Amino acid sequence: MTGETAMLADLAHPVDADRHVENGIEDWLQLLRAEYLEMPGLNLTKRQAQRLWNLDPALCDALLELLIADQFLKRTPAGAYARRVDGPQ
């Protein structure tokens, strides 16, 4: 389990939290990637992302940071999150 998923395990309540969190995180990451791919030019603030996907702040932060670490998203100078078109897709 990675450091990010270990941190997210604290947000889950099931007995087998590590596995559930990892599966849930992958599902969320897949959804966010699909949304950004489906809507070229999508540019969201953290608050907008929280509202759009109904995420709590900690989970939203973790997902966005994972997508930045994967070089899928970048943070704009205005603080929004946009697809990084010059990196791995």
Image (spheres, grey):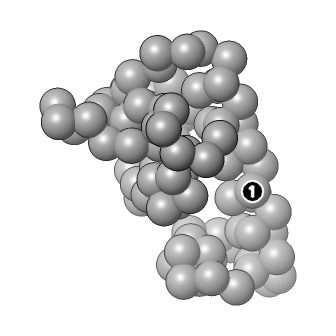
**Number of numbered discs present?**
1
* Above or below for 62 versus 7: above
Give me the residue at 67% from left, 48% from top: 29
Q: Which residue is mark 1?
A: 26
| Quadrant of the frame with the N terminus | bottom right
Q: Position of residue 88 (x, y in %)?
A: 61, 47
Disc 1 secondary structure class: helix
Of the pair 18 and 67, the residue shown nearer to us: 67
Of the pair 71 and 60, the residue shown nearer to us: 71
Residue 80 sits in which quadrant? top left
Q: Is residue 14 visible?
A: no
Of the pair 12 and 89, the residue shown nearer to us: 89
Q: Position of residue 85 (x, y in %)?
A: 50, 32
Q: Is residue 40 visible?
A: yes
Name, please, the residue furthest toward the front: 86
Name, please, the residue furthest toward the left: 78
Q: Position of residue 57 (x, y in %)?
A: 39, 50
In the image, is 28 to the left or to the right of 82? right
Of the pair 89 and 17, the residue shown nearer to us: 89
Residue 48 sits in which quadrant? top left
In the image, is 53 to the left or to the right of 1? left
**Classed neighbour count for the residue bearing mark 1: other residues with Cα under 10 Å, few (<14), some (14–19), many (≥20):** some
Give me the residue at 59% from left, 26% from top: 36
In the image, is 44 to the left or to the right of 8? left
- Identify residue type, mark 1: Glu
| Quadrant of the frame with the C terminus | top right
